[in-house]
Image (cartoon, rainbow, N blue to C red):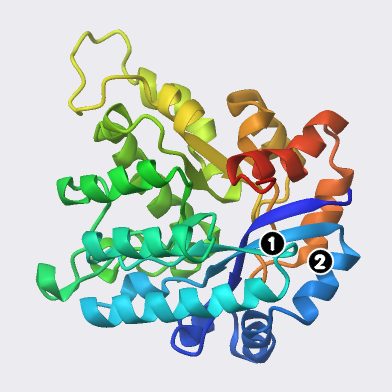
Amino acid sequence: MHGKIALEEHFAIPDTLQDSAGFVPGHYWDELQSRLLDIQDTRLKLMDRHGIETMILSLNAPAVQAITDRDRAVEVARRANDTLAEECARRPGRFRAFAALPLQDPEAAARELDRCVTELGFVGALVNGFSQDTGHGDGTEPLYYDLPGYRPFWAEVERLDVPFYLHPRNPLPQDARIYDGHPWLLGPTWGFAQETAVHALRLMGSGLFDEHPALQIVLGHMGEGIPAMLWRIDHRNAWVEAPPTYPAKRRFVDYFTENFHITTSGNFRTQTLIDAVLELGSDRIMFSTDWPFENIDHAANWFDSATIAEVDRVKIGRTNARRLFKLDG
């Protein structure tokens, strides 16, 4: 399929490059860092070869979210966004941008998002999970965005009318004890999905989408496991009549099917895609590769031949993203 749009596609700047060093064995690091620092060469050639018209680019992880000093987080986010804006301006038809945001400081993050959208032409934000901030202790307490202090930030996201991509990061060491002795479970194998799914469920349960019903959140990797669990999340012990113990007013399936979108990034399995279509409908699923951590050819070759209806392939591969991110405007 030609004309695909991919939207979980990462790059790095020198300040954040080493954050990705631990995700591949050492002898692969030269290749991965080359992929991360390249935008206009190998990346573009692979896009052409595999029918990808546009990539929406975002900073690698955890990057800004793991910087515990607020001022430095603001500085690095701004530097990354300025760098990305310059790269996208070279080929605006091929590259668009997600803002990196210093959510250690919700007010600064709101200002930076406004700058990126209104001045730089960015189409949304991608944030790498919870943030850390020495202003809230020693920086080892994760800041999740359902906390009350983030409501003004979410109001700004809603006002700007841009999607927010909630991207994974690993849990902090004190919250990762379940993985002790089994480090292979961290990262893409399991830890990323578990951490991000819990964060997304916290947002839903907090009542955020009752207050800001127009918000649109994107999750990668076929929804981080949530689509398969929606019925159970809403119906646990259904024979027991008890009021919910969370503030949200509606079912989780309602929020997920009205306020969330998912991508195929890093999860190239047709059965999983079909299940997601059955749960969400094809209008809320979008193609992505997760370059450079996954191969573009693996993602594109699988998607182009997946046994789904052609009308759904076009939606997922192209038109859903064009609509959500207003790429025709």
Q: Decide: is 321 above or below 71.
A: above
Which amino acid is tagged 1?
Met
Q: Do the residues under discs 1 and 2 have CB atoms within 8 angstroms? A: yes
Give the CA distance from mark 1 to mark 2.
Answer: 8 Å
Which residue is rendered at x = 74% and y = 62% of the image? 93
Q: Decide: is 202 above or below 81.
A: above
Q: Position of residue 276 (x, y in %)?
A: 63, 33
Which residue is rendered at x = 22% and y = 47% of the image? 152
**Mark before the other along the chain sequence, 1 or 2:** 2
Q: Which mark is residue 47?
A: 2
Which residue is rendered at x = 73% and y = 36% of the image? 271
**Between residues 151 and 257, which one lies in front from this camera angle?**
151
- The residue to which callout 1 is attached is 55
Residue 220 relative to residue 235: left or right: right
Q: Residues within 10 Å of mark 2 (few under 14, many from 20)?
A: many
Q: Decide: is 325 above or below 188.
A: above
Q: Residues within 10 Å of mark 1 (few under 14, many from 20)?
A: many
The answer to which image quadrant residue 279 occupies is top right
The answer to which image quadrant residue 114 occupies is bottom left
Q: Secondary structure at mark 2?
A: helix
Which amino acid is tagged 2?
Met
Q: How many marks?
A: 2
Q: Position of residue 21 (x, y in %)?
A: 52, 84
**Between residues 56 and 309, which one lies in front from this camera angle?**
56
Residue 110 relative to residue 318: left or right: left
Residue 61 relative to residue 307: left or right: left
Q: Position of residue 157 (x, y in %)?
A: 37, 47
Quick check: can you spot residue 309?
no
Q: Secondary structure at mark 1?
A: strand
Quick check: can you spot residue 35?
yes
Q: Position of residue 132 (x, y in %)?
A: 24, 69
**Between residues 300 and 215, which one lies in front from this camera angle?**
215
